[in-house]
Amino acid sequence: MDNERTTEKIAALGPLTIGRIRIGLVFLFLASLAASWEQSTFEQNMAYLGGTISMAIVSFVNLLYSFRRGTIPKQIGMYSVLSDIIILACVMFFAASTEKNMSSGIIRQIILYAINVIFIVYSGLLLSPKFVILAGFVSAVSQGIVILNCYLHGVVFSEEPLEVLSPGFASISEQILKLIFLIVISFIVKSVINIFSLLRGAEEEKLATIIISGNELKKSKGKMDSAAVSLREKSRSLRNFSNEFFDVINNHAASFDEIGSTLGEFLSQIESAAATVKDQFGRIEQLVSKSQSLRSMIDKIADYSSELNERIHSVQGTSKEVTKFVSGLSDSLESLGESFRSVGEVTEIMAEVADRTNLLSLNASIEAARAGAAGKGFAVVATEVSKLAESSGQNAARISKIIGESNKYVANGRNTASVTTEKVRDQENQFTAFMARFNELNVLLENQIKINDEFLSSLSELRKLSAGIETSSNEQNTGASMIMVAISELQSSMDSLLRKSELLSDTIRVLEEEAELLAMEN
């Protein structure tokens, strides 16, 4: 045991320890308050929050005092413990000052009761048995005041098993036992402190005896002990230096092993990357060649597209001329039909003339028959006129028939010309739509040419970059190989140094054993 750890210093640790415990309780209270915020009433939450803040202020004051003075006086520690007990009593008092269902829950909470027990226990860290009894009685009295406040706010105290578990009820025997238990705990803690004080006194007496004996032994040993201790310390220092040096060498050797294995893996990765870069470079060369072939094909397609565009324009012009020709043919057939209708009217007139001539010849024959011999010549003329009229009628009928058939052919031709005109117009419209699509195709083809040019340019740049990467990879591979050779040589040197360090460590161990023997003899 050290002489510097006096009774006063041991006692001064009590208030500091209590302050640390109090800070931990503040954080626990805050966490509990956050977790139960929704289950408690506003008044209870405000009471809990106010009590937590008050304890935090007490903790801050003690912490500030310890920073400035280096310690906390025992009296301030006592006042702080009493303030903790009173703050808890006030929190329970105000939290229980609500309706009876909430009040009964306050006095039945084990956590709040356990906090009183914690206060009594850590009051014993001040090493004052009387103060522990005081803290126990203050806790019991404050708890009794809280129980009385609950009774005044409607809590019914009963011993019925079912009622004491219901909201608004509480067991009076349980509350009395809690108060008695607080006082009993304070006496238990007091007894523990008394025992600790007796043990401390015995240790102090033993320490004093050991100190006196040590002083006498030191006086008798004298210079020989001092020389042996000096030799031992120097041998220990040398051994520590040897051990540290040995550890450093081992660490360096292990580091070199790791570096060697890492560089080996790195070298294999470089070789793999170099192979990959070479393969990538070859594929880029193939892709560039294929892209140039694609460019030639696109140029040919563009030439064919221009030629096809010109031919389509020519066909479209021819189609327009055919449309005009068919329209003229339709008009000519319409005019021909009108002419045939006019000829039909003339034929009808000729038929009418033939009928009248035949009627006239019939009348002439009748009159010639009445005239007898004098009318024979007239009868011959009438007969010829009748034949002429009959022939004219037949010719008119034949002409009418021919004109009718011609009208049918003209009508069929006109219909065919009309249908042809519609078909040609549809064909012209289709050519127009085809031309629009073909123009769009030309625009897309031009865009494809631009994209292909950009792609070819990017491939050229990528080929240059791949060539640079391949060169860098080869240089890096060469450098890594040289590093591996240097590390191998350095590792051989470290192995030799490690063997010499082990020999030095054995020599120092022998020297230390001899120093220990010398110290024991003295």
Image (tube, rainbow, N blue to C red):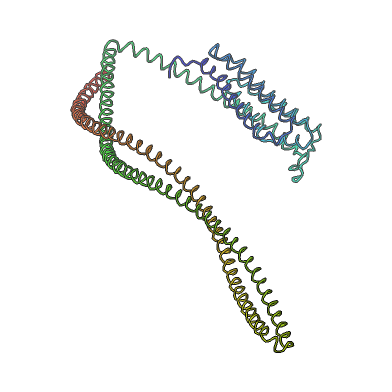
Task: State the image quarter where residue 43 is shown.
Answer: top right
Residue drawn at 66 percent across, 68 percent down: 345
Judged left or right of residue 53, residue 332 is left
Q: Position of residue 475 (x, y in %)?
A: 23, 31
Viewer-nearest residue: 484 or 470: 470
Residue drawn at 67 percent across, 71 percent down: 349
Task: State the image quarter where residue 141 is shown.
Answer: top right
Q: In the rendered view, tell whether residue 103 sits above or below residue 200.
A: below
* Residue furthest bottom as drawn: 372
Task: Give the mark count.
Answer: 0
Q: In the rendered view, tell whether residue 221 sits above or below residue 267.
A: above
Q: In the rendered view, tell whether residue 393 sits above or below residue 520.
A: below
Q: Position of residue 410 (x, y in %)?
A: 58, 66
Viewer-nearest residue: 237 or 173: 237
Residue drawn at 59 percent across, 16 percent down: 74
Task: State the image quarter where residue 285 is shown.
Answer: top left
Q: Position of residue 336 (x, y in %)?
A: 58, 63
Judged left or right of residue 16, residue 442 is left
Viewer-nearest residue: 420 or 11: 420
Q: For the N terminus, which image quadrant? A: top left
Q: In the rendered view, tell whether residue 122 sits above or below residue 404.
A: above
Q: For the C terminus, which image quadrant? A: top left
Viewer-nearest residue: 500 or 420: 420
